[in-house]
Amino acid sequence: MPKEEKSEKDEVKVVKTEDLPKNHFTETDLQIEWNLLLKQLQQRKENVIFNAIKPFKLVKSDENQITVLFSSDTAKVEFDKISREFFNHFKTKVHNFSIEIIYQRDSENQKQEVKTKRSIFEKFIEKNPLLKDLDDLMRFDLS
């Protein structure tokens, strides 16, 4: 029996975005949907993804553009797991299918200083030098 080889080509449908709706959306719309996603992740007990993407900031940077500010590459990997679902939902909700997503590292969230009791106390000393004298007198245990 001869084997029949079927050569099936993957069909790729190209949809032109200019034919799709481009309704206006606001920063508020974006923030409402983002907070809703975070609440859903928390309720579904997907703590790893929730904790990774919680510090992300989504900003409407142009009429059809959203900038995602992320803190680390590992957090972005976790976000990539749900990003397609989130943005498809958002595009459908606001009826704008021409939204472009830009990823940008958030330099503000990268530098996270570990605050110890000693470092907090030293900042207070800068504001009120009398605390230094009090520390010398009382020998506070700030370890």
Image: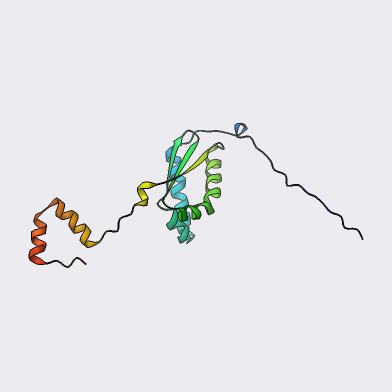
How are the colours assigned in the image?
rainbow
90 vs 143, left or right, is right
> Residue 72 appears at what percent x and percent y?
43, 53
Q: Which of 57 and 120 is in front in this view?
A: 120
* Residue furthest right as drawn: 1
Residue 118: x and y in percent read: 21, 61
Q: Left or right: 131 with respect to 10?
A: left
Residue 39 visible, this angle: no
Q: Which quadrant is the N terminus positioned in?
A: bottom right
Instruction: State the residue at coordinates (52%, 49%).
Output: 83
Q: Nearer the viewer, residue 37 or 76?
A: 76
Q: Residue at 87% x, 58% y: name it.
A: 3
Q: From this view, report whether residue 35 is shown above or below residue 114.
A: above
At horizontal 80% and vertical 50% (from top left) the residue drawn is 7
The residue lying furthest to the top in this view is: 18
The residue positioned 63% from the left and 34% from the top of the image is: 16
Image spot of residue 85 (x, y percent): 55, 49
Query: What is the x, y in percent for residue 143?
Result: 21, 67
Does the rendering let one see residue 35? yes
Give residue 114's quadrant in the image.
bottom left
Tally of marks: 0
